[in-house]
Amino acid sequence: MDKRVDLSEFGLSDAELFSRVDTDTLSAEKITAPRYSYWHSVFRVFFKKKLNIVILSLLAIIVVFAYVYPLFANYDRFAHVLVEGGKHLSPEKAIAQHPNDSAIHWILGSGGAGESTFDAIWVGSRLSLSLAFICALINMTIGVIVGAIWGFSKKFDMVMQEVYNIIGNVPYILLISVVVMILSASFWSLVFALTVTGWLAIAYFIRTQVIIIRDREYNIASRCLGTSTFRIALKNIMPFMVSVIVTLTATEIPSYISYEVFLSYIGLTMSDISLGKLIGTAQPSMFTPGMQIEFWAPVAITSIITIVLYVVGQNLGDASDPRTHM
Amino acid sequence: MTKYLLRRLLHGLISVVIVVAVVMLLVYSLTDREKIFGNDPMFTKKASNLRIIYKYEQWEKYGYIDYVTYNEYLIDRTKSGEISEEERAAAVNIAPTAEKIDVNGNQVVSPYAKGDAPEVSKYVHQFVEYYEAQGYTAVRLNADYYSAKTGKLNNGGKQALFVYKDVPLLKRLLTYFGNIFTVDNVHYVDSSTDIGARKLTFTLYDPAYTKPDGTTPFSPAIIGNGTRHKYLLYFNDQFPYIHQNLLNISMGTSYSINKGVDVYDTMTLTQGKYVKQVITYPTGLIEESADDLHSATYIAGSHDLSETISDRFTDDYTNISTIKASKSKIGFSFVIGLISVILAYLLGVPLGILMAKQKDRFLDKLGTIYIIFIIAVPSLAYIFMFQAIGRAAGLPSIMDVNNESWKMYILPIVSLALPSIANLMKWLRRYLIDQMNSDYVRFARSGGLSEGEIFTKHIFKNAAIPIIHGIPGSVLGALVGAIITERVYLVPGAGNLLTNAINANDNGVIVGLTLFYALLSIVSLILGDVLMGTVDPRISFTNKAR
């Protein structure tokens, strides 16, 4: 398309159309580039994908159901234990059984104590999600800090390699069982058990990443120019690490939920209801005709939660890599 | 290279020792030692003081404490000639209570509540002082009266005196590692026991193969008397045909999982249906039985315990295991694990290549969905899913040792292989794409190499190196077994041994398994490095080559 416009159409003189601009030495010195804000770009790239918006809304729904819904559901496992014929019901029967309740409670039928499976799942999710978030927060914080020092200090590296070799070979289940045995099986003892050595693997991963970036040419150049190690770590290496850390967190959070499910299955369960405990207790219903929903409902919702968390984290990790901001 | 590997192996072994020490600290010092009696029927049968004594005896047996009774102390002193037999006999009977008090702690009322006689008291004091000086704690259990008036005791309520001390970690560690390998010898049986001439006999006609007609076919064997095992060397029709009992491995004795049996045996003994064959017992009794005469070990005084035993055996070598038709625990785990590892590499490698070649196209996206599913979904959930699908397809969903068929292996193998495939796909794709974007590939392309050549000769060779590094680990890892898979499909494998041992507080098994796992992990890392160095000549572990 030809964009040129014939100026004679307007019937204006040259003096009206043009004015003289003086040379501005000050502005000539200014470097103009498009404004770049790191986090702004991260979210721009993240929301460019339509799938991410869908997944993020799913995550929002999950969080609301796990943290807000139980406040209104008044879940009590044994509230319906005396209701005759109220146990192990299919959704239709359970809704018919409780005409006074809103149907949402009984949308997944009832469990072994006549309780609502749907409510139980979200009460369990709250605990499992909290466990995953708290463990991830603690492990990532300690892991990243220790890993950064580990990557920079050669002396520390020698010591930590040995620690890693030894603790890495102590069976993890044994460690958790001993902690649970000593401290009783509560939420916080499980948090302690999962974090007491859990940070080590993260620290090792971060250490390897730091070592890879530490000796790149631009950092050697930076050091030659007299930049302090602290500043190199903060300004030269940190930006590279953000996407690594976010990606790692994305794998860590669902893994704690999976781990809790696994621990419940082998008998190291918390006393409060969690997703793992729910799946473990409902396992006998798996092959009982008419009761399968009791088992598959928590399994399906756990899977959805972990997949959503993982995908959000991975895509956020991709978006936080500055190379994708072009 | 050899020197480097030996140094690494040595370094690894030191780590293993520290790992075992850490685990010992965890299980012996930090857990409640009363818990080991939770599943012990002998413990519940005993009452009163006898139960307390039983506890200390078992703790000594399983390495928690050093435990010496007053009686043992006196016998030792008699043996060394410090006191005479008469003095010992007089000193051995301690009074029901240490002081002249009755059962309620008041001054003497009952004639049965009295302090030690002076000739007893002297040795009791010496005993307690001697051991307390060494850091022992003395325990005196007063008689447990059913009735203070008649002096009738409760069942097992007899008074007792003993001292005990916790075994220090270092000593426990040294004893443990010192006893891992034992060489059987003719002095195994207690020197005070008369068992005839202690010797090793070499025979060309193994008596265990005696036929019902009394003839014995040619089969060399070495038979011991005074040793732990009766048969030290023998031949049979099982691979590797020649078997020995001379060098024994003991990794830790089980307390509750498989009482009194070593972890090594628990993992390697056959399971399932008995294999019966006509055998001739040492006494000449001919019977159809699954007994494996070659496994006979010595138990003092066992010959006269029951008629069943004395009818069959001529000596105290009566402790025998049986031959069963199916694989051992480790055998099951290894077969399932190994097939799934092979399957994983056969499928995972081509699929990973396909994903990398089709990057960002349909197949790559499909593969990514599969990988996300496996990584994100709890493994328990998808194993149950596979089980339900397999069941719907008519496959056996649980394993039955007594009724083996090849079909029952399918679901466990698939359940183990699918996550490994996802993992291989994920990493191989990542490595391949990294290589594809590197400069040397562009250079090769500009040099006129065909795409196929570039891929097979350059990209794949480089990308495969980290994958190859993991092969020994996954093969040896198959020996460990899988916890969830084996539980869900009821596989009689080794994977659940550790969790079961933890639940039953079986410290011997826990320590033995830790040693086994740690050794496997060290060996597989070293083997991985060796393999990687063989495949890629650029990798060198010695500085000189550079």
Image: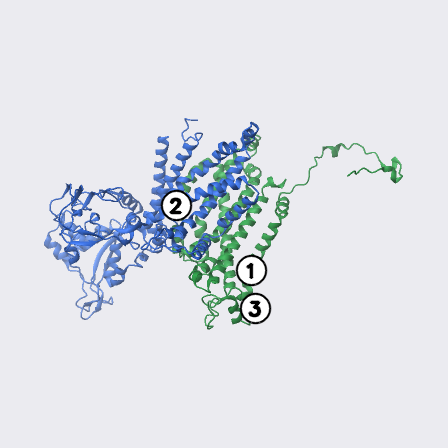
Chain colours: A green, B blue
Mark whose residue sits in front, 3 or 2: 2
Residue A65: which numbered mark, if any? 1
Name the residue type under label 2.
Ile
Q: Nearer the viewer, residue B137 or A42?
A: A42
Name the residue type under label 1.
Phe
Kind of element beneath mark 3: loop
In this image, B75 relative to B523: left or right? Answer: left
Q: Are marks 2 and 1 on the same chain?
A: no
- Please identify the quadrant where the N terminus of chain A is shown: top right
In this image, A233 relative to B131: left or right? Answer: right
Q: Residue at x 12, y 56 (%)?
A: B89
In this image, A131 relative to B522: left or right? Answer: right
Kind of element beneath mark 1: helix
> Mark 3 highlights which residue?
A102
Q: Nearer the viewer, residue A189 or A126?
A: A126
Residue B426: which numbered mark, if any? none
Q: Is residue A241 above or below residue B96?
A: above
> Mark 2 highlights which residue?
B339
Q: CA distance from mark 3 to mark 2?
A: 52 Å
